[in-house]
């Protein structure tokens, strides 16, 4: 399903559940939603819904769940799951008006201030997730009166003071539970946990039947050494997260816990091996051991865990090869990037997310790879030693991210890529040995946001079908053998932030339509045969004109299943090429060097106060340097 939600749906007064997660819908939530008086669940997560939530939605009294995770919704909002957005300001006090609210998830945004006391009215609240904010003050005592609360996540904030004595149905049983602005010493944690049995003193606990079944201490700046045997008395423990602290976690090779773990997060815990006790964890669903110092092969028994859904072993020093057959049919998320794995590529049968990048895999991509990708949304094989042609079977309908960059792939782009991969958000084939003309049919990729073909041997002209890709934010065709004129329709790509055409054989003049791109922050046309004047109407480049942009965030694409693709870019910087692992919103550059441009430097360039670099060298420009450029010209 694509496009706006049909009006007829919003008028279905008897509809109770509307789930459109992960579809291609776009547009805004209309005010006629007030007609859906029976609506209980509205799930628009992972879509292109945008704008603001209409205030009239508060009158839909039947609404129990509103899930807008990873959408383009803006502004302060009123209901339920809005995690992983870019909301800011203070948390609305109007939440207390919904006394039937049972789930409030606002994690991962930019809210500030204190937890509003109005939430204390929500006595049916079962899940309260306010993690990863800039919230401050003390944890309010009234949280202990939310008797139905099962999940409380307050991690990665700036709280101080003591932990409330009673929190939901579980009790704190020590005398000195102090948050100390979110920083614990591991010795404090150990002393608290060593005497606990099922009833646990801590934070971010998941409680089941009055007993602790989960503990989340990730991101608390814990320091020191800790052994997993510390948790052996927690017989109901099935969720444990210690990731992203300053801990060194040890596990005795003979230790066998009393619990069956479902989800284990030990990322960045200085592990040097994969814990052996996991071989007997038959209910393991999610395992994250990323960013450690594990130097062994991946043990074969990992691929035999029948319930494993999520496996993240990225950023270690794993060696060896993958088995010829990965037997875990439940495995849908596999992240092994940034290791030293080698040998031929192997694929789990039903993975939705597969990241094997930054390893040493060699040989060709199997010609039958499509048989393994029927449900795959995210595939990254970048930065390996792969060679040969890109198989035509790789062109699968569900692919949203395809990254084969930085290999030794050759031949042409498969002819079916632009006709079959109609769901692509990101296509990165940069830094290979691909050749031939760019294919036609780009108009079929109606949602593509990043197209990176830099560093190949493509020839011919830019195909006109790219003019139909109105969602493009990054167009990088640099370092190829493309020729002809830069098309005027480039100005119709109104969302474009990066236009990289450097080091080709383009000729003619710079089309004035380039200045019609209000979001453009990087323009690199260097190293071509362009002639004529620099366009003068540069004041339309609003992103470059804004010098007040201090936002440290970067350009990224949110994909289904919570995956994120982070764009990279190489720009001319201080006389050389600099590769940026992230395209920061504050990075604003114009490079027109090494062409045959003539005439004077436009006075309007001085209005682009947000520029960090401006390179006009090695042209045939004449006249004076405008005083408006100041001292920042390079």
Image (cartoon, rainbow, N blue to C red):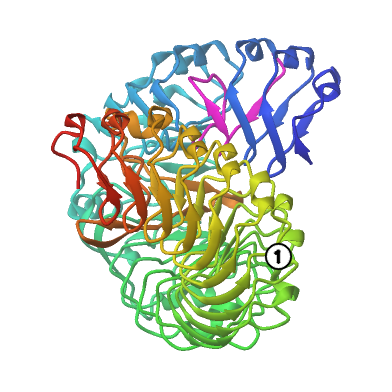
Q: Which residue does the image show at 74% across and 36% down from the upper left?
A: 19
Q: Residues within 10 Å of mark 1 (few under 14, many from 20)?
A: many
114 over 630 or under it: above or below: above
- Name the residue that disc number 1 marks: 417
2 over 97 or under it: above or below: below
Q: Nearer the viewer, residue 90 or 40?
A: 90
Q: Is residue 72 magenta?
A: yes
Q: Is residue 309 magenta?
A: no
Q: Nearer the viewer, residue 224 or 233?
A: 224
Q: Position of residue 155 (x, y in %)?
A: 35, 40
Describe residue 459's horizontal placement relative to residue 44 as left or right: left
The N terminus is located in which quarter?
A: top right
Res. 160 visible in picture:
yes
Q: Residue furthest left?
A: 631
Describe residue 224's horizontal placement relative to residue 521 as left or right: left
Q: Which residue does the image show at 45% across and 36% down from the upper left?
A: 107
Q: Position of residue 374 (x, y in %)?
A: 74, 66
User: Taken as a whole, is the magenta stretch helix, strand or loop?
Assistant: loop
Q: Nearer the viewer, residue 318 or 629?
A: 629
Q: How many numbered circles are shown?
A: 1
Q: Position of residue 628 (x, y in %)?
A: 20, 29
Q: Position of residue 403 (x, y in %)?
A: 54, 65
Q: Secondary structure under badge 1?
A: helix
Describe residue 249's horizontal placement relative to residue 19 as left or right: left
Res. 178 visible in picture:
no
Residue extent of the magenta highlight = 61-85
Residue 110 placement: quadrant: top left
């Amino acid at each position: 399903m694509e496009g706006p939600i049909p009006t007829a749906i919003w008028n279905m007064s008897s509809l109770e559940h509307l789930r459109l997660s992960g579809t291609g819908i776009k547009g805004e939530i209309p005010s006629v939603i007030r007609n859906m008086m029976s609506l209980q669940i509205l799930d628009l997560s992972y879509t292109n819904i945008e704008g603001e939530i209409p205030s009239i939605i508060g009158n839909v009294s039947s609404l129990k769940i509103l899930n807008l995770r990873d959408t383009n919704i803006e502004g302060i909002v009123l209901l339920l799951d809005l995690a992983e957005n870019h909301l800011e300001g203070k948390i609305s006090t109007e939440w207390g008006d919904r006394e039937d609210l049972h789930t409030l998830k606002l994690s991962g945004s930019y809210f500030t201030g204190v937890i509003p006391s109005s939430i204390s009215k929500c006595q049916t609240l079962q899940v309260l997730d306010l993690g990863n904010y800039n919230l401050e003050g003390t944890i309010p005592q009234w949280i202990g009166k939310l008797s139905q609360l099962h999940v409380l996540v307050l991690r990665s904030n700036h709280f101080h003071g003591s932990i409330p004595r009673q929190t939901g149905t579980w009790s704190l049983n020590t005398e000195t539970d102090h948050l100390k602005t979110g920083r614990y010493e591991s010795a404090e944690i150990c002393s608290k946990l060593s005497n606990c049995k099922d009833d646990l003193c801590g934070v971010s606990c998941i409680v089941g039947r009055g007993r602790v079944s989960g503990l989340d201490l990730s991101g608390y700046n814990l320091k020191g050494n800790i052994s997993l045997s510390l948790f052996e008395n927690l017989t109901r423990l099935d969720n444990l997260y210690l990731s992203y602290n300053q801990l060194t976690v040890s596990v005795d090779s003979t230790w066998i816990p009393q619990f069956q773990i479902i989800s284990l997060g030990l990322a960045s815990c200085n592990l040097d091996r994969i814990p052996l006790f996991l071989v007997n964890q038959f209910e393991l669903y999610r395992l994250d051991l990323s960013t450690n110092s594990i130097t062994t092969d991946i043990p074969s028994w990992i691929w035999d865990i029948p319930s494993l859904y999520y496996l993240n072993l990225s950023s270690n020093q794993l060696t060896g090869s993958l088995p010829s057959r990965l037997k875990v049919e439940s495995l849908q998320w596999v992240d092994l990037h940034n290791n030293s794995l080698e040998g031929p590529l192997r694929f789990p049968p039903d993975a939705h997310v597969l990241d094997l990048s930054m390893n040493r895999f060699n040989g060709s991509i199997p010609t039958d790879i499509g048989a393994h990708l029927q449900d795959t949304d995210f595939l990254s094989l970048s930065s390996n030693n792969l060679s040969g042609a890109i198989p035509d079977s790789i062109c699968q309908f569900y692919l949203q991210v395809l990254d084969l960059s930085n290999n030794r792939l050759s031949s042409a782009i498969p002819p079916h890529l632009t006709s079959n991969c109609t769901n692509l958000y990101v296509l990165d084939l940069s830094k290979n040995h691909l050749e031939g003309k760019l294919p036609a049919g780009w108009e079929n990729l109606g949602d593509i946001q990043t197209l990176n073909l830099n560093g190949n041997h493509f020839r011919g002209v830019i195909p006109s079908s790219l003019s139909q890709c109105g969602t493009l934010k990054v167009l990088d065709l640099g370092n190829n053998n493309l020729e002809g004129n830069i098309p005027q329709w480039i100005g119709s790509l109104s969302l474009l932030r990066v236009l990289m055409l450097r080091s080709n054989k383009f000729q003619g003049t710079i089309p004035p339509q380039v200045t019609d791109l209000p979001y453009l922050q990087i323009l690199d046309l260097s190293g071509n045969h362009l002639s004529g004047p620099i366009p003068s109407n540069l004041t339309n480049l609003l992103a470059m004109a804004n010098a007040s942009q201090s936002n440290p965030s970067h350009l990224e694409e949110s994909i289904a299943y919570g995956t994120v693709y982070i764009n990279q870019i190489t720009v001319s910087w201080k006389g050389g090429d600099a590769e940026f692992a992230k395209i920061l919103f504050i990075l604003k550059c114009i490079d027109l060097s090494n062409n045959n441009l003539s005439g004077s430097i436009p006075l309007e360039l001085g209005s682009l106060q947000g520029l960090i670099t401006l390179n006009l060298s090695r042209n045939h420009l004449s006249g004076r340097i405008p005083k408006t450029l100041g001292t920042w010209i390079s």
